[in-house]
Amino acid sequence: MYSSTATVWKDEKDSYKVMYLSGIHVEESFGESDSSGISGIGGNGLKLFVNRETPLQLGDYVCAGIVTEAEPPTNALKIHSINRYSLNRGLHHIEVSAR
């Protein structure tokens, strides 16, 4: 699935701050079943491709699309890596991975 919007929850001690990122590229991956029929062996994942600086941090929660809940739903994924890529000394894009 491709989407141009993602919802992010930033933990702020007693509550969450909800942010919406638009104008981005989102790729979702889903765990595969093995021969025994057990699903999710590979685990679900989400990659965000952002072409500008972003306040995302490791440990934030994210979902593809717009989610209106005040706290991360059970299908929200936790950001585990943020990689910045440069071209000619300028930011080209940021890849954010969550699982």
Image (spheres, helix red, strand yellow):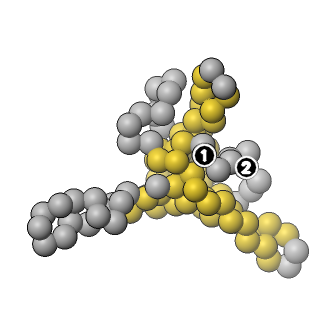
Identity of the residue drawn at 68% across and 47% down: 56
Label 1 amino acid? Gly
Residue 79 location, x and y as percent? 57, 51
- The local secondary structure at tag 2 comes to loop
- The local secondary structure at tag 1 comes to loop
Label 2 amino acid? Thr
As drawn, which residue projects farthest toward the right?
A: 89
Q: Which residue is mark 1?
A: 59
The picture quadrant where one finds residue 93 is: bottom right
Q: Could you say which disc has been placed on residue 54 in the image?
A: 2
- Mark-to-mark CA distance, 1 and 2: 14 Å
Identity of the residue drawn at 50% across and 27% down: 71
Local crowd at mark 1 within 10 Å, few (<14), some, or many (≥20)? some
Local crowd at mark 2 within 10 Å, few (<14), some, or many (≥20)? few
Instruction: Judge whether 72 appears above or below 55 on screen.
Output: above
Residue 63 location, x and y as percent? 47, 44
Instruction: Judge whether 79 appears above or below 41 on screen.
Output: above
As drawn, which residue projects farthest toward the top?
A: 14
Give the camera-side residue of 18 and 50: 18
Residue 10 location, x and y as percent? 63, 35
Q: Can I make out residue 45 in this image?
A: yes
Circle nearer the N terminus (1, 2): 2
Q: Could you say which disc has been placed on residue 6 in the image?
A: none
